[in-house]
Amino acid sequence: MATLDPFNARQTLGVGGDYYALDALDANGIPTAHLPYSIRILLEGALRGNDGFLITEDDVRKIAAWTPDGERGEIPFRPSRVILQDFTGVPAVVDLAALRDAMVEMGGDPEKVNPQVPVDLVIDHSVQVDVSGASSDALDMNLDIEYHRNMERYTFLKWGQQSLANFQAVPPSRGIVHQVNLEFLASVARQEHGVWLADTLVGTDSHTTMVNGLGVLGWGVGGIEAEAVMLGQPIYMLAPDVVGVRLTGSLQPGVTATDMTLRIVEMLREHGVVGKFVEFFGSGMKALSLADRATIANMAPEYGATCGFFPVDERTLDYLRLTGREDAAVAGVEAYAKAQGLWCDEGAEEKSYTAVLELNLDDVVPALAGPKRPQDRVDLNEMKSHFLHSLTHEEGHHGHGLASEDLSKSAIVEMNGEMFDLNHGDVVIAAITSCTNTSNPGVMMAAGLLARNARQRGLSVKPWVKTSLAPGSRVVTEYYEATGLQDDLNAMGFHTVGYGCTTCIGNSGPLAEPIEAAIDEAGLIVGSVLSGNRNFEGRVHGKVKASYLASPPLVVAYAIAGNLDIDLTTEPIGHDQEGKPVMLSEIWPSEAAVDEAMKVITPEMFRQRYADAMNEPRWNSIPAEASPLYPWQDASTYIRLPTFFSGLSATPAPITTIEGAKVLLKLGDSITTDHISPAGSFPAQGPAGQWLVERDVKKTDFNSFGSRRGNHEIMMRGTFANVRIRNQMAPGTEGGFALNHETGEVTSVYEAAQIEAPKVVLAGSQYGTGSSRDWAAKARTCSA
């Protein structure tokens, strides 16, 4: 539909092209100068998208009337594009393919089912750390295994790329979706059909919010919402509260962007920002690099906000230039942002906010977060006492519930010609992983320099630690090689294992068999330290109960120390060749050293790496042909025609009353989507594993729940199958059990759900938080 323009807002931008000017509203007596930047972007989208049907003049007026304490009515948001990752993107494309079948069933043209806005799917969630960073061949070996496991899925996505309009897939090993978005896909502002618009998006990953650090408004949604946007529909939402965070000061030497972000997560969780926008401003912004801002924006789901937004300023333009964007595009962004009042000058008048919090960056100190939630920050100098207390603290978010007599338990491990004791608190996984940190040059250079300094002092990683380095961007490898730091990381066991999410999403791969056996034998509470954003119980690895989020240099430090039972601020991290103690402070890199290392980063690195972003030899060799309908394979265990759209009619069935329902699960607080629809590995003895075993799939080829989201049979059987979930209807159990109300037996949740009576799930606060995961909703409907 054509855009209606009752405010005469369409004007010409100085760099060429038209735009729908927000100040036209002011000229019509509708003031907008007070609006937060993020609300102005919502307003621009409504002003430009007013078609009198899906978006109306009244919608424009409602958004423009936003005030800090005003009424929060429903408003439309029509993003300009959609971004997907493969775990959540595959089921979205499966639904589109199934809709084409349904269109034929209803007598329509299947080729009319296409995305109506640009859709990019980045394959980053499938690589696993089957081979650790101790091996120089880890990258190639893990990629080979990834393709072997996922060929069915990748063939399907290749079909989608060739058969669907407005859809492209970025092949494996190109980087993590949010880095690819930040460094390559995002435009901040661009022209479409001669009209400038603010770059906005939704994505099927909760950390889509990372791009808000670049001044691009977007957040994660479930697959069902993303599909609606793909098919041209707006998202309808309540106008949000906007909490302002005034940043002052600057980070002190030795304090990283990760430390700052964990402090912000803690602060905003305490305040309460669920369902709200957060917008950052203040003099402290000038002390933050764009990568630092992106780190903060990335963890918006962890502090509970819809998004954490940074407005466009000179730092934004500097980053666009650094990452190889064309000069004309950068000039367009600047002209558009200034014309629309989206430009943030130092000293600009403060916008109106629902509430204003303040953080003095001078006060931030080194920290980690854990053992089971990202908002539970722990100062580095308190880590030892914190961990020791958690061992005997009652079982829950903050404790493991060990009896005092169990504290001395340990196990002897013989592995690779070495013999050692494995104890409570030993770090068995140290992973530089995740979208949050692994493309922030400041912390990545710090990790490499710490590895170099440790290597020079003769320090090494403990033999029980599984190490891995999984950069979010291939550019990281460019600057590691240019500085020689990759050699130092390799020497410490941090060879690159892949360019994807890996450990942060539970793709940590297996621990060595002797390690797993020792954990089980002695009932050990072992640890992981990762530079990720999620450490929910059971997420990182099924055998690891204490997981801590930390900056990349601290990941290297804990790999060297080998245990959580250490105060790295007062105790030696190890001993040098002469037996002298080495303190962490002695090998921690200086700011000057980090700044010097970062000088090697050039726009050409980004241009070269992204010039071939859409090409990967293995991907290019996958045979797939364009066709109106996908050729479903009955024998497939990855991609199956779902039942959702069979028998569709033009008239929806009426909503009926629920009567005689039975409680399937009664759960506590903080039940996340990881509990409802886990993404990691699964056992052969569970319903999902048994379904595969019955089809002669070997345990080594099970892959993960996340990789099998294109198969509704697996996802139904995996609902509430998290290994740490505790159902009060089945007391004394852990890991996806429920009471069968017909037989009185305790069975798997899937089996108990097969009774004919309606089922309900009872849960406490923060139910459904975590990753945006459509199967957390779909599977409950299918399995009920």
Image: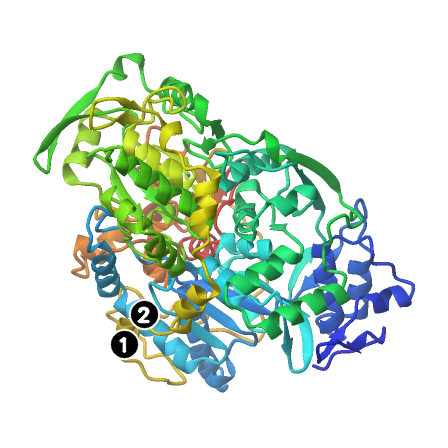
Residue 86 falls in which quadrant of the image? bottom left
Q: Looking at the picture, how far across and down is residue 252, in whole percent?
A: 55, 33
Q: Secondary structure at mark 1?
A: loop
Residue 546 falls in which quadrant of the image? top left
State the CA–CA distance, disc 1 to disc 2: 8 Å
Q: Is 354 situated above or below 325? A: above
Q: Is residue 98 visible?
A: no
Callout 2 amino acid:
Tyr
Q: How is the image coloured?
A: rainbow
The residue under label 1 is: 622
Residue 431 falls in which quadrant of the image? top left
Residue drawn at (71%, 80%) of the image: 16
Q: Secondary structure at mark 2?
A: helix
Left or right of residue 25: residue 272:
left
Callout 1 amino acid:
Ile
Q: Toward the viewer: 14 or 481?
A: 481
- For the residues labelled 1 and 2, say whether their Cβ atoms are less than 8 Å apart: yes
Which disc, if any, is residue 670?
none
The residue under label 2 is: 154
Sequence-wise, the earlier of marks 1 and 2 is: 2
Residue drawn at (45%, 58%) of the image: 601
Q: Looking at the picture, how far across and down is residue 72, in whole percent?
A: 76, 51
Q: Is 47 situated above or below 466? A: below
Q: Looking at the picture, how far across and down is residue 614, in whole percent?
A: 39, 73
Q: Toward the viewer: 602 or 317?
A: 602
